[in-house]
Image: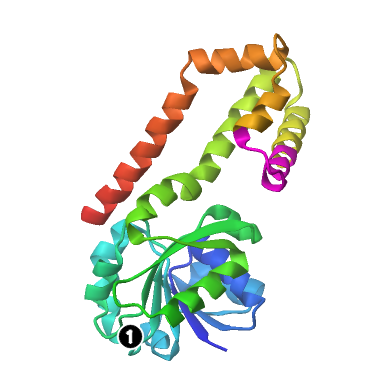
Amino acid sequence: MKKIGVIGSGSMGRALISGWTDSGAGIVAVVRDVEKYQYLEKSLGIDVTDDRSALLECDVVVIAIKPQLIKEILHEFQPYIAQHAIVISVAVGITTEFIGKCFPQTAEIVKAMPNTPSQIHMGVTCISAGESCSESSVMVAHELLSAVGEVFVVPESQQAAVGAVSGSGPAYLFFLAEYLQAGAQQLGLSADLADQLVRATLHGSAQLFAQSELTAARLRTQVTSPGGTTQAAMEVLDSQRVGEAIGAALEAGVARSIELGKS
């Protein structure tokens, strides 16, 4: 069983760790503030330390810190990464080339883009191999990340796009839920009822979409009876160019990902 080291334990780091604790793997989280993350030792049964040398014993090292911080401090970890260790980065915009320059002792570098539903083991992760990364290391990364949801292998050139879609995608759903709840209350429903209705509706709709062979457009058509209430609602969304706004939002996400990689 491989030993996994995680640099940083923010929301994504914790989501991944929670998925791996069930596998029986030995996990150590290397953090700056041990006291802040001490609860992870009891709740998830892992080791938490600020001693970077603990990473030298790890077969796999996961970089789960913010991209802005990576540019400042990642090179400091170079002495603590074992020869030929598999390094998996979940930082937006940070390329495998940059990681490779920080850790020249290994070519086994994988870029990964998970999303927050990984917290409940229903995430989506897209992974890309570095230029000299072996197929066996990609398989290890695929197996590890499968513990928290579905995994897709994509060229690294597509990572900014998949990040905008699946990485940021949950925020689009939560944004819709937020305004559906607010609108329901404006129509006179209680906050509690609005919350329950929106949660149940989105949950059921997501399950229907996941299990159906029909396209999203076709499923939407099934709900939208000609001359009915849903059509009236869709016409308002079309008049507000919501579709164009979503396209522009995706493009903005891609642009920011590229910007983070260059800054």
**Dot 1 surroundings within 10 Å: few (below 14), some, or many (20 or more)?**
some
Q: List the residue tagged with mark 1.
A: 80
Residue 28 in view, yes or no: yes
Above-or-below relation of 3 to 210: below
Residue 39 in view, yes or no: no
Q: Who's the residue at 64% across and 79% down the image?
A: 23
Q: Who's the residue at 70% across and 12% down the image?
A: 226
How far across and down, in percent of the image, does residue 41 sit? 59, 77
> Given the current orientation, which residue lies at the most extreme top position?
227
Q: Quadrant of residue 24?
A: bottom right
Q: State the residue in front, 66 or 241.
A: 241
Above-or-below relation of 246 to 23: above
Residue 48, magenta (yes or no): no
5 with respect to 146 (left or right):
left
User: Magenta segment, which residues?
Assistant: 204-216
How far across and down, in percent of the image, does residue 35 sit? 50, 71
How far across and down, in percent of the image, does residue 19 sit? 61, 69
State the colouring used for the structure image.
rainbow
77 with respect to 193 (left or right):
left
Q: Who's the residue at 37% across and 60% down the image?
A: 155
Helix, strand or loop: magenta stretch: helix
Secondary element at tag 1 = helix
Q: State the residue in front, 52 or 224.
A: 224
Q: Who's the residue at 49% across and 77% down the image?
A: 139
